[in-house]
Amino acid sequence: MESYQKSSYPKKNSNYRGGYKKHYRGNNQQYRNNNKNFYNNYNNYYPPQYYNPYFQQEMYYRTEMYIYSKYRHLIDINQKNQDLSKKIDNNSQYFIIKSFSEEDVHKSIKYGVWSSSKNGNLTLSNAYKLSNEKGGNVYLFFSVNSSGRYIGLAKMKTPCDEKKSFEYWTQDNKWPGLFEVEWIFIKDVPFKEFKNIVITMRDGETKPITNARDTQEIPFEQAKIMVEIMEKYQNTNTILEHFEYYDLRQDNYEKNIMMMRNNQMNNNNNNNANNNNNANNNNNNNNANNNNNNSNVIGNNINNNDNDNKDGKNSENK
């Protein structure tokens, strides 16, 4: 019978595992020692920041004063429409609006307009005409992509006019058409408040309402629950806090556009002036050449006449 050979693997308490641990710790310690200066410099450049409640209160006060001075009609907009869920007509329709940028929502609130994609505008226009005939309205729940919240509720006032356009969207010439909206609620309501609302999407799949895409219609019962949640939610943040920043951005953008247009007009005027000068110079040169040619012809005719007269006199003398 063959003798049993013991396993060649090291025992549990052998030097192999101990050596492995020491080797690992050594490398880790060496890494920290080599980067000790880096950590010290990092703490010097980026010191810990402390929360200042007074600064936060000052920012809230500044926002309120700015909105009160320039957008006074938005101060108590949420309180004015507090009982909307009790007044909604059964013939009204509801849709989700997904914006690529919060700055576009700022323009919508500021100017009372909106525009979606070509198919989205067609869907909303048809819904507006149908609801308007029955005495209802079309309500729009606004959300910015990847924001994790709804930022307000608006109502369509007109169908979409494809001939109109708006020049201040963040993506130029991408959103043809324009329709007017009236904002009803402006408040940030997180998606978690609507997690229990499930609808059937356009593609036939059943998903939470927070997964809906742009211009997705919401059934009446679920939409009514969403309106009740939005009007009862006690918000702490709104897009109005960023209005001063977005207004400054728009002012700078308009100034740049005006400068570009003025420069273009000046360039066109300079080009026209140069073209006129070149044309005048060419005309003057042509006139001078014509005058020279005429004088040469006249001179040649005089010389020919003189020669003929001389020849005549010579023949008479002979």
Image: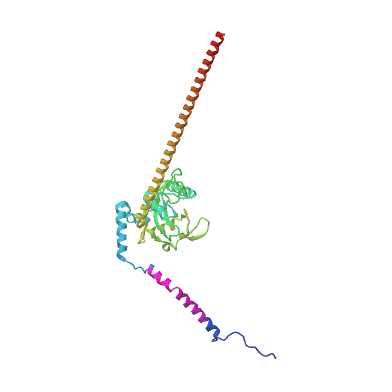
Q: Quadrant of the C terminus?
A: top right
99 or 252, which lies in front?
Answer: 252
Quarter of the rendering containing residue 275: top left
38 or 186, which lies in front?
Answer: 38
Residue 3 shown left or right of residue 310 in the figure = right
Q: How many marks?
A: 0
The magenta stretch spans residue 197:
no
Magenta residues, start to end: 21-44
Image: 316 above or below 103: above
Residue 234 shown left or right of residue 309 in the figure = left
Percent x, y of residue 90 = 41, 52
Percent x, y of residue 267 = 43, 41
Q: Quadrant of the N terminus?
A: bottom right
Q: Residue at 53% x, 10% y: name it.
A: 313
16 or 144, which lies in front?
Answer: 16
The magenta stretch spans residue 30:
yes
The figure's colour scheme reads: rainbow
33 or 9, which lies in front?
Answer: 33
Q: Magenta segment, principal secondary structure?
A: helix
Percent x, y of residue 161 = 44, 44
Q: Residue at 56% x, 10% y: name it.
A: 315
Image: 92 above or below 283: below
Q: Residue at 44% x, 36% y: name it.
A: 274
Quarter of the rendering containing residue 225: bottom left
Image: 37 above or below 242: below
The residue at the far front in this view is 318
